[in-house]
Image: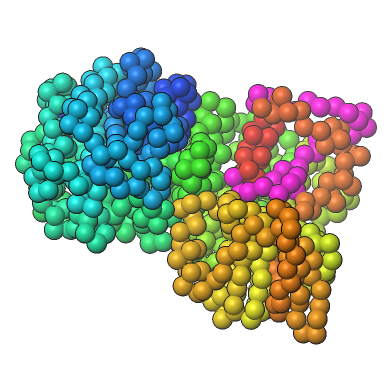
Amino acid sequence: MSNDPLLQPYQLKHLTLRNRIIVTAHEPAYPQDGLPKERYRAYTVERAKGGVAMTMTAGSAAVSKDSPPVFNNLLAYKDEIVPWIREMTDAVHEEGAAIMIQLTHLGRRTRWDKGEWLPVVAPSHHREASHRAFPKKIEDWDIERIIKDFADAAERMKAGGMDGVELEAYGHLIDQFASPLTNELDGPYGGSLDNRMRFCFDVLKAIRARVGDDFILGVRYTADECLPGGTGKEEGLEISKRLKQSGLIDYLNVIRGHIDTDAGLTDVIPIQGMANSPHLDFAGEIRAATNFPTFHAAKIPDVATARHAIASGKVDMVGMTRAHMTDPHIVRKIIEKREEDIRPCVGANYCLDRIYQGGAAYCIHNAATGRELTMPHSIAKADRRKKVVIIGAGPAGLEAARVAGERGHEVVVFEAANDPGGQIRLTAQSERRREMISIIDWRMIQCEKLGVTFHFNSWAEADTVQAENPDVVIIATGGLPHTEVLSKGNELVVSAWDIISGDVKPGTNVLIFDDAGDHAGLQAAEFIAKAGGKVEIMTPDRSFAPEVMAMNLVPYMRSLQKLDVTFTVTYRLEAVEKSGNELVAHVGSDYGGIAKQRTFDQIVINHGTIPLDDLYFELKPASSNLGEVLHDQLIAGRPQTAWRNADGKFQLFRIGDAVAARNTHAAIYDALRLVKDI
């Protein structure tokens, strides 16, 4: 048996867990009709196949109809969920993993105009900032009903074969009772800590009475809200002890912080540029004080940190949840002593930010996650070896090279720059996005193992490509900044890339016109402001940086607000003209009726990219498919068979921003779904 602390089994009551790594409860927003159908099951089972000890589904499943999910969650109040749960739990158990589900009532952390349009309930009328609903103050009959709903839901989950359930008790209704900030009830459920904890214990008692002792119960809760007037560390420790002493639960799952604002949520679940494992020592304090099984997860992205968490005795089970979205086979690779092959989580938080905007969770650089029914995590060998020539070593080109190499093809990559990375290397110039370079580094390691040939500092011409006698040519040349968006004065502006790369010195009084809404505009603003410049970010949209999304926006705002950056929405830069040493900005509005003039010494445009596609169009006449992609074949996962030119010598495709300005995930997905069938 291995002496690796992570690979030691753990006995949780009657349940033997095969190692110390878990996937904690999270909702990837894959349900259909609130049920875990084929897509949800395939996603969950993949992590079990990869060797994880236990996977927890739902973050969290709703137990009541007046707890409508704000995005696509499981609905544990539906009787018809049971057979779907059974199919999923049976499949996970067949792979040797345990499975639990997290249950909740959201309380005020939802909206009344979701689901059945029922009033939001909470132990006070205080609105939660994130979801903005003013709740009804909960009544005694509401409490009775919701306690029964929890017990009913837990019984359904046991009938479905779950090994246990976990209650979500931070930010949601149970925590809203426990926290003095959100509980203004009188009587048995308000006032003292005993009273504020009563709802939690009543729920646990009702569940335990329904499911018996041979079923795991746990609570994921905050032991320190980190808010003035809220549950502090001392009271959190007391809550921890009371949970243990109740005899109702089998483990504690500890977090620190609050989730009622974007900033609070991001501190609980940190993103790239923020410290790794910021709450691990705190969880260790709870473990030491209670001597009770303790779980914890919060930006533990790497095996070394997870191993330390277990070896040091800080926790009994370590959660690597986002890490398993990036690579579901972490444990298998540890067992096989292939830790260097683990695809690294870069903390980009594309997964969580997408679900909070109503989309499905996808990993920024594993396009198979969430698409297990159509996209492979392990690439199969091709029937016939081909020569594949790829132009460009950005994320799209490197993914294409990696997948083609895994297919067993001979792969040659031409890159004009000294180093691989493309826009990723540029964005990683920012300290807060430095982790992004791992997207490139990991692919380079994989490509080198697969024997991919690279030619750097090589500007590929059509003759260069054709001299390779390729079977397939893939253009992944990306794009160049698109700054010619003004009616006048396009020659007077610079791009956000110019600032980030250091090619252009920051001005002292700068306007950034951000019509793309992605990271580049905010990165440029931060570079300029940190250099001492006065910065205004202007956008024609009603909100700025919508492509950055909520949690990624938090560290930018903390920095930019301290640097006194101004944010101006709903105004459009229309033209620029020179006046002496200054630039005059002509500003209008899409709403009409506005014409202003403003003066700056530098104007920066962030408006996405224009495809760098000259080589593609030069090669197109010599290709057999004339560049055509048959969409039905692409979507269905079949090889491309377009044949439009009998004299063509090779298939020609383009991917990523060489097609149109999108994002890193789109570029990698382009590559994976095309090349897996070449």
Q: Quadrant of residue 77?
A: top left
Relative depth, front residue between 19 and 490: 490
Left or right of 522 in this view: 78: left
528 or 432: nearer the eye?
A: 528
401 or 104: nearer the viewer: 104
Q: Is residue 11 above or below residue 463?
A: above
- Residue 500 is situated, as x and y percent measured from the top left of the image, at 63, 69
Q: Residue at x 40, y 35 (%)?
A: 112
Q: Quadrant of residue 472?
A: top right
Location of residue 128 in the rendering, given as x and y in whole percent from the top left corner: 35, 48
Give the side of residue 526 with respect to residue 137, left or right.
right
What secondary structure is the stretch in magenta mostly built from? loop
- Residue 145: x and y in percent read 22, 25
The image shows residue 238, relative to residue 79, as above or below, that is below
Q: Looking at this view, name the residue that lies furthest to the bottom.
A: 580
Start-end of magenta stretch: 636-665
Q: Is residue 396 visible?
A: no
